[in-house]
Image (cartoon, grey):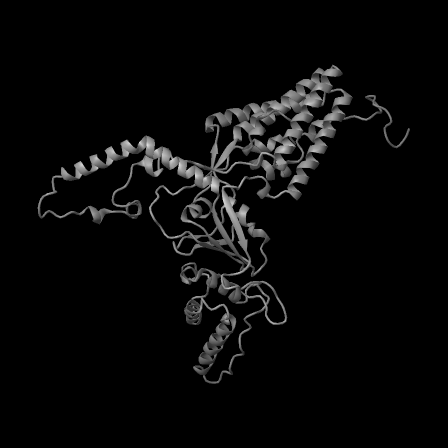
Amino acid sequence: MGWFPATRDSNNGWRFDIVGLLAVIGESTIANHAQAITASSLSRFPRLIPAPQTLLKTKRPTRLPSTKDVIVMGVYSGTHLEELNYFADVIHDIGQLKDYEFRVYDIEYSKRVRKRERLTARLRKLFLGSKTEAHHKEGRGAQRRKPNAVAGAPNNDSDNATPHDEEQGTDPAPAEATGTDGGEVVKIPMHKFCALNILTIGSILLTIGLFIWAMLIHDGVACVALASISLSASIACLASQWRPELSQRPTKAAVPRGDVVIKTRGAAFVVVHCEEEITRELYAGTEKCNYQVGEQWYKVLVAISTVLLMVAVVLLGNCEWTMQAAIGAAYIILNGLYWGVLLVAKPTTYWDMRRYNVRIRHETRGGLRGAHVVNEHSRASFTRTLWYAIQETREVGWVVEGDLAPRSLTWKKWLAMAKENCDDADWDAVGAKDKLMQGAASDHDASQPGVSPSPAPQADGSSSCVV
């Protein structure tokens, strides 16, 4: 008897009774792709997919995963967030930033979005114009009919105005005109030919090929097993199918620009120049998962998919030898391909972000660049990168409101100096801070007799805590 089986007989040959186990291996890989897979319209097609039980969750996520340990500050709005939304990270790829690195992003709507907005505005004016005018006339008539609208009677309506009313204006338009009800929902579609969609199409074709093969060799058990496990994956994807929706401003009232500054744990700074509408969509708003199936139907579909999966695992162990080998090889190939996509493809390749025009700069308006670069003349530091961000925004309020710098008197003086010199790209921000620190240390030592003067602080060290 040889070291390895040489035949396919049931006693001494190769056996693939455990092929059902291959169908449920690869859970960690599919878990990383789960949300992207179920966002594709192709996911509803029956096909083989490794570890379909990964999609059979008791509870669906309500929003996309965000990036933690990141501070997002509104330059003019004062917005303070401690996480970065998913699609914002798709644009910035924050995890790839080096310590003390500095970048500038100019983000605006693409031309096709501008055209669609103009067309929508014209259609609203055409079909809702008469309704809006009637609303205004009715409102003015109601004001004239107020019981307290007599000579000398005080008008206290302004005292009860809310910030939301102030943003909308004193003469708000109806909901249909402002977009608060029935307005356009911002959706981010997937690329039609992204790696996951191509892999899904290949899996569909592979499943069809295996089914035809099983029919040609008259393996009825394999046919039923393939149909069962393919339908299980299809139903599981249908139960979790969703579309991403971004938040929108409910009004079109004039507001300051929506510029934001992003600070990472490694003291890298990203300045984003954009409109408030874009800020609401990408940074300040909540990214929602709009599921195509309700909660009750979701539970029913998950139960059906679970039963089909269990039946398929039993049937796979009873297929003929040829189909067991073919299906086992198919699952090995699919697992390898999903691993490969995870290694080489980034989220930016999944989603169609052409709604926005994004331009990246690595220098400030004054020409400062290379904040993270270390050479014989300078070393990377928090102070230098912060100065680059201040020089780009020409504001320091966001630093104070976001607690992005120490609250000491010395730092307050330095921020005031940075504000005064924000138009001077040649100002030595690190040197000015070092002098202030040395002066503060000397004053502190002078106030305590018997204490030797402290050495000058090392402001440009390579440690992440160095300021």
Residue under the image location 49 percent in, 71 percent down? 427
Please provide percent x and percent y for residue 380. Answer: 58, 66
Q: Is residue 280 above or below residue 220?
A: below
Q: Position of 212 compared to 90: left or right? A: right
Please provide percent x and percent y for residue 182. Answer: 37, 33
Q: Is residue 29 visible?
A: yes
Residue under the image location 56 percent in, 61 percent down? 100
Q: Position of 94 compared to 439: left or right? A: right
Indicate the quadrant where residue 101 lies: bottom right
Q: Which image quarter is the N terminus in?
A: top right
Q: Is residue 460 above or below residue 268?
A: below
Q: Is residue 66 visible?
A: no
Please provide percent x and percent y for residue 160. Answer: 22, 47
Indicate the quadrant where residue 3 lies: top right
Q: Position of 409 compared to 90: left or right? A: left
Residue under the image location 58 percent in, 62 percent down? 372
Mark count: 0
